[in-house]
Image (tube, rainbow, N blue to C red):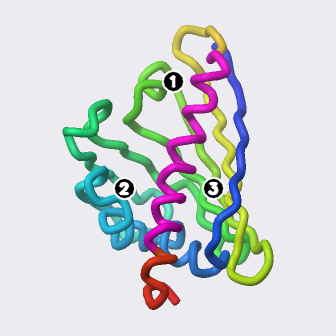
């Protein structure tokens, strides 16, 4: 089986601690449907938010593509602001993968700013390596969600302050 690792990062105009609390610390079920209105219909959590918790994001059918994304929490390090999860289902690229583990972290980058860092480790079902455009899709979905959360938090400075 072909295995790979893809990394990416992006600047975010929200302080690291605030972004962590809103999107990664275990409150994503509260902010994602608001920040991604019209795209994410709901976020369901099975478990207590600790290791092994399964999160399901249900998508608006009008968006097309996958109806839901499910992931299982493997690790959450609040001090380092890093979350590691296993994708269980969702996405056109994910359907071609035997496994997909994502690590998302947020680091301070000055006053009111942060850097989101993403690493995706994957193994394909057919043994063929993923082409570069599909590798990019693995990280761009996460960046797109975080950019929506960024927009929401900038527009609502009182939330997760």
Location of residue 74 (image quadrant): bottom right
Q: Please tell me whether mark 3 sits on a helix, a strand or a loop.
A: strand
Q: Is residue 116 left or right of residue 50?
A: right
Whichever of labels 3 and 1 marks the residue nearer the N terminus, that label is 1
Return the x and y of residue 107 as percentages of the image width and height. 74, 69
Q: Is residue 94 left or right of residue 30?
A: right
Q: Is residue 71 left or right of residue 11?
A: left
Question: Looking at the image, which residue is at 51% across and 49% down?
Answer: 144
Query: Residue 89 or 74: which is nearer the viewer?
Result: 89
Say above or below: 100 vs 114.
above
Q: Is residue 151 magenta?
A: yes
Q: Are marks 1 and 2 in contact (CB under 8 Å)?
A: no
Q: Residue furthest right?
A: 110
Q: Is residue 94 left or right of residue 70?
A: right
Q: CA distance from mark 3 to mark 2?
A: 15 Å
Q: Is residue 143 magenta?
A: yes
* Magenta extent: 130-152
Location of residue 31 (image quadrant): bottom left
Q: For mark 2, what is the residue? A: 55
Question: Looking at the image, which residue is at 67% across and 75% down?
Answer: 16
Question: Looking at the image, which residue is at 66% across and 78% down?
Answer: 15
Numbered circle sitting on residue 104: 3
Say above or below: 128 vs 153.
above
């Amino acid at each position: 089986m072909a295995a790979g690792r893809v990394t990416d990062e992006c600047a975010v105009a929200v302080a690291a601690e605030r972004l962590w609390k809103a999107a990664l610390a275990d409150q994503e079920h509260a902010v994602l449907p608001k920040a991604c209105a019209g795209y994410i219909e709901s976020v369901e959590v099975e478990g207590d938010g600790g290791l092994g918790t399964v999160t399901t994001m249900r998508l608006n059918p009008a968006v097309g593509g996958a109806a839901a994304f499910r992931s299982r929490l493997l690790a959450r390090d609040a001090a380092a602001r890093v979350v590691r999860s296993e994708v269980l289902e969702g996405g056109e690229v994910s359907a071609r993968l035997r496994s997909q583990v994502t690590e998302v972290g947020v680091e301070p980058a000055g006053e009111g700013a942060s850097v989101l860092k993403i690493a995706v480790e994957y193994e394909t079902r057919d043994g063929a390596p993923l082409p570069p455009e599909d590798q990019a899709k693995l990280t761009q979905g996460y960046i797109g969600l975080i950019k929506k959360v960024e927009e929401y938090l900038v527009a609502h400075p009182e939330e997760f302050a």
